[in-house]
Image (cartoon, grey):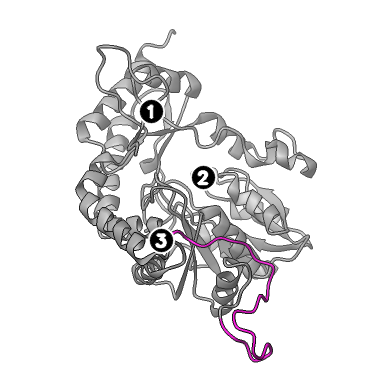
Amino acid sequence: MEKTLFPPGGSPAGAAAPIPFFSQAATFDELWKEIRAGCVDVLDRGKFSHGAKVAELERRLALWTGATHVVGVNSGTDALVLLLRAAGLRPGDEVVVPAYSFIATASSVVLAGGVPVFADIEERGHGIDPASVDSVAGERTRMVMPAHLFDRLADLRGVCEVARRRGLTVLEDSAEAIGMRLDGTHAGLVGAGGVLSFFPSKTLGAIGDAGALLTDDDDIAETARALRHHGRAGRTLDHFPGIANPTVLSGCNSKMDDLQAAVLLAKLAGLDAGIARRSELATRYDARLREVPGVLAVPGAVPPHPGGNRVCYVYLVEVESRDALAAHLAARGIGTEIYYPVPLHLQPCFSHLGHARGDFPRAEAACARALALPLYPDLSDADADRVCDEVAGFYRGRPG
């Protein structure tokens, strides 16, 4: 199993060792005995999905987040689709989403039968702007789904106030937000429901795709559990006498694999320590980069919204000459990622919605300037310092 993700081409011969954008090699070495035991247990049981490991993960995540219900599924994207459907989205209903986010924030609305309506992001930070939500919501709008990105919650208080006035259901794309809370309430539980992604690079990552739906709403949870298993209710209902496991909805196959659950259970015990280590590294980056000419914004310069906390999944800077900086770092063996290269309203799959460049200028500016630097618990202080040195060196060496 390949344990690291290195930048294309690696580093030049004789250069310092590469710094991948993400690696969990040391973590897996430390946890391998427990991970192996969990996976062998799955193989011995012969129940490979929707089994005992998934049930245990759901129980422990419910305790960790405070959620009444955790529904394990096979990806964060599926969790969004099932959440939208379980919360009552009907064909043609509109859902307001940010123009700056991962594609699944909007494509999940389409897959659930709805229509995404885009809103711009805040002037400082990358969360959806409540004022923009208010301006774009219309008569067919039924829901609003802010995305919590990188290291902080969106302005949930502002979004919820707009939703209250307009009669909208608030759902949360909290795929990146494990550990983020508003006044002690975990991300995904402020509105009617939220999701988690366990993609390998996430704060709690599996070794493949996996996700979960979070909610305190009994009806949403029951519907989501049916939808993930082909719409089967999982029990005999009074109005279907004599029929066990009746298919009551048009669902899909989105059950979580028990092997992924076994890995996540092994890693869950170290989640708090991993979050703390990410915070240490982010603080180190903040201090080193905030005064570098050409670095326009560091995450630590923008405080969380009142009542929120900072949990660093991605360390995202906004910079001048972003693409040239990324190429400079890659040539020196340092991996980076662009979050996100194209704003959602300009993606070809949404061209039928009729948007043009300039419609959401803050989202467009973020897409042009944002660059994520390596951030993960296995990253050393020395490697973080080397990243900062190379960023500073790039801007010192620019012509003019």
Query: Residue visible at 38% across and 51% down?
Result: 206
Judge depth for marks 1 and 3 and give the one in front.
3
Q: Secondary structure at mark 2?
A: loop
In percent of width and height, residue 70 lies at: 45, 69
Q: Is residue 89 above or below residue 115?
A: below
Q: Secondary structure at mark 3?
A: helix
Q: Earlier in the sequence, mark 1 or mark 3?
A: 3
Which residue extends farthest top?
399
Q: What mark, if any, has residue 87 been given in the picture?
A: none
Q: What mark, if any, has residue 335 been given in the picture?
A: 1
Left or right of residue 259: residue 350: right
Say which quadrant the N terminus sits in. top left
Magenta run includes residue 164: no
Magenta region: 235-257
Left or right of residue 208: residue 332: left
Q: Quadrant of residue 372?
A: top left
* Distance from Cα at disc 1 to Cα at disc 2: 22 Å
Q: Which residue is mark 3?
A: 258
Q: How many C-alpha atoms fall within 10 Å of the one at disc 1: few (<14), some, or many (≥20)?
A: many
Residue 315 in sight from this viewpoint: yes
Q: Amino acid at mark 2?
A: His
Query: Which of 190/8 is in front?
Result: 8
* Distance from Cα at disc 1 to Cα at disc 3: 31 Å
Judge depth for marks 1 and 2 and give the one in front.
1
- Report the predominant secondary structure element of the magenta stretch: loop
Magenta run includes residue 240: yes
In percent of width and height, residue 68 lies at: 44, 76
Q: Amino acid at mark 3?
A: Asp
Q: Which residue is mark 2?
A: 126
Residue 359 in sight from this viewpoint: no
Count of numbered circles on the image? 3
Query: Residue visible at 48% across and 24% down?
Result: 322
